[in-house]
Image: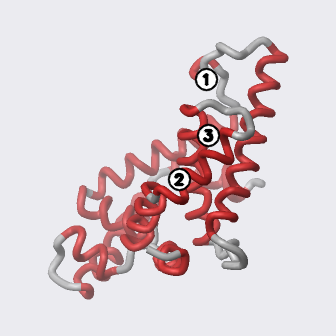
C-alpha cells in the first residue's frame, strides 16, 4: 500500500478509512520509524506503543479534516506528530512528578462540572439511541462515522441503498422526536450548545 492509497482511503471515510487506519497501524516501516522517533525522546517501549496508537488516530483525523497536504512523505509527517505527542507526554509527566502525582491514578481525579455535563449528555444520547432499536442505533452510528449508504447497507445486510437511506431518515426523525419530547435533553443541549 502506498502513501497515496492510504491517504485516499482515509479521505474516503467509512470502511475504506477504517481499513486504511488498520493497515497504517500494522505497517512495519511506519510503525518502526515512528516508534524509533518516540523512543529517541526517552520514552520506554510501552509508552512508545501507546503514543503510536495516538499518532495513527491523530493522522486519520487530520486527513479527514484536510489538514494533511501530501507535501513530503507520510512517514515524515507521522514522525512530526510523534515528536509533538512525545514532548507533550514528557511535559505532562514532569508536571505530575513536580506535584508528586507520578503514581496518582486518573480514576481518582475529580471531574470538572463541564465534563460531567458532557458525560451526562453522552449517556442520555446513548440511551435515546438505545430506545430506537439496534438497527437504528447501528445505522446512525455508522452514518456519523462517515460510512456511505452502500457501506451501511453491506455492513447491516439491508435490502438496498434506497432502503438504507430511508431507514436512516426514519431513524433521524424518531431520534429528533425523542429529543423534542425530552425536557432533560433539551435543557442539556441548551446548556452545552446554546448558552456559550
Residue 103 image position (x, y, % from top left): 65, 13
- Residue on which disc 3 sits: 117
Q: Which residue is mark 2?
A: 31
Residue at left offset 70%, top offset 72%: 67
The quarter in which the C terminus is drawn is bottom right
Question: Mark number for residue 106?
Answer: 1
Is residue 145 shown above or below 169? above
Mark 3 Cα within 10 Å, few/some/many (few <14, many 20+)?
some
Classed neighbour count for the residue bearing mark 1: other residues with Cα under 10 Å, few (<14), some (14–19), many (≥20): few
Tell me if residue 173 can be seen.
no
Question: Taking 107 as reference, is 140 above or below it?
Answer: below
- Identify which residue, 150 or 137, lies in the foreground: 150
Please report the residue visible at 54 percent of the width from the left and 80 percent of the height from the top: 4
Gap between marks 1 and 3 measured at Cα:
19 Å
**Quadrant housing residue 110:** top right
Closer-to-camera residue (42/179): 42
Which mark, by number, is residue 130? none
Q: CA distance from mark 1 to mark 2?
A: 28 Å
Among numbered discs 3 and 2, the one appearing first in the sequence: 2
Evaluate if marks 1 and 2 touch, with contact meaning CB atoms under 8 Å apart.
Answer: no
Query: Where's residue 133, x and y in %?
Result: 25, 56
Amino acid at each position: 500500500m502506498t502513501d497515496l492509497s492510504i491517504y485516499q482511503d482515509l479521505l474516503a471515510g467509512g470502511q475504506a478509512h477504517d481499513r486504511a487506519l488498520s493497515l497504517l497501524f500494522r505497517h512495519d516501516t511506519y510503525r518502526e520509524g515512528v516508534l524509533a522517533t518516540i523512543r529517541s525522546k526517552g520514552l520506554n517501549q510501552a509508552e512508545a506503543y501507546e503514543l503510536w496508537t495516538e499518532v495513527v488516530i491523530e493522522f486519520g483525523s487530520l486527513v479527514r479534516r484536510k489538514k494533511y497536504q501530501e507535501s513530503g512523505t507520510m512517514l515524515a509527517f507521522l514522525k512530526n506528530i510523534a515528536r509533538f505527542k512525545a514532548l507533550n507526554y514528557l511535559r505532562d509527566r514532569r508536571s505530575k512528578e513536580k506535584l508528586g502525582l507520578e503514581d496518582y491514578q486518573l480514576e481518582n481525579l475529580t471531574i470538572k462540572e463541564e465534563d460531567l455535563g458532557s458525560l451526562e449528555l453522552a449517556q442520555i444520547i446513548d440511551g435515546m439511541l438505545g430506545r430506537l432499536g439496534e438497527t437504528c442505533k447501528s445505522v446512525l452510528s455508522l452514518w456519523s462515522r462517515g460510512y456511505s449508504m452502500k457501506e451501511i447497507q453491506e455492513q447491516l445486510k439491508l435490502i438496498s441503498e434506497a432502503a438504507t437511506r430511508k431507514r436512516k431518515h426514519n431513524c433521524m426523525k424518531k431520534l429528533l422526536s425523542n429529543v423534542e419530547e425530552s425536557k432533560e435533553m433539551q435543557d442539556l443541549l441548551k446548556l452545552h450548545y446554546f448558552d456559550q
